[in-house]
Amino acid sequence: MVANQELKKAKKQHQTMEEKLNTLRAGVLGSNDGILTVVGVLFSVAAATNNQFTIFIAGLSDLLACAFSMASGEYASVSTQKDTEKAAVAKEKRLLGTDYAGQLKSVQQFYLDRGVTEETALAIAKDLMSKDALGTVVNVKEDIQLGHYMNPWDAAFSSLIAASLGGAFPLAAMTLFPAATQWPATIVAVLLSVTLTGFLSAKLGHGLVKTAIIRNVIVGIITMFIHYYVGQFF
């Protein structure tokens, strides 16, 4: 009995690869947003005034606002996804009670589409349905692993922390370096940071690393350029 309870607990705590990637995705996006929004405010304010305290407060305020904004956005987005997944599971559960044969046929068709013979597909479907009908159906029809829903809190905290850390790099460079070197130091900090986020986003999305890095660097340069000249108008 105890062993079964421990096994169930371990299964419940285990995260799927999709859940882990979703948390990492939120972190990468949060970090990139934190870098660009904070440096945008820093460049605008620093171009308009030499008051270091004003620059620091503006950058810090934006960092906090960005971090909590990203976190709340991720929470709302992933919560909606979780609700959608739960609604799909509830629908399939109802169908199992009202149209079991149709559900069995759907599972059979899933394997038929993958080149399995009709008899073998039916045998597989019956075997799987006899062991875990609901889990089998939601996995085949909805691509959901029963009991594993996207966690909005994981995404929110990941985005909150990553956005804070991302924004901290340009903020530290602009406020801690001497006035003579704060501009080049901030530019270097931003370019290195967006290079890292570009690399991570490409790896997570199985995309082209070089393309992702170049894209992020260009966006970073444009962001700094625009905000600097916005500050110059005041």
Image (spheres, grey):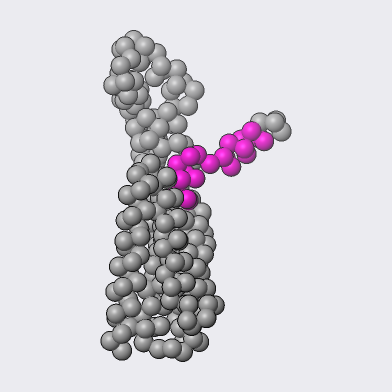
Residue 178, can we see it?
yes
Above-or-below relation of 59 to 79: below
Q: Is residue 156 visible?
A: no
Which residue appears farthest toward the front when viewing the image?
Answer: 180
In the rendered image, residue 135, in percent from the top left (x then y), is placed at 45, 31
Quadrant of the frame with the N terminus? top right
Q: Does the segment drawn in magenta span residue 71?
A: no
Q: Position of residue 25 (x, y in %)?
A: 43, 51
Q: Main secondary structure of the magenta part?
A: helix
The reply to whether the magenta stretch includes residue 23 is: yes
Residues 13 and 165: in front is 165
Q: Which residue is pictured at 36% across the width and 11% down the height?
A: 120
Q: Residue at x 45, y 17 (%)?
A: 127
From this view, report whether residue 217 is shown above or below residue 9: below
Q: Which contiguous range is marked in magenta?
A: 5-24
Q: Quadrant of the C terminus?
A: bottom left
What x and y, as percent, mark residue 10?
62, 37
Q: How far across and how far down the image is residue 206, in percent? A: 38, 41
Q: Residue at x 49, y 86 (%)?
A: 52
| Vertical order, 3 against 159 (above or below) | above
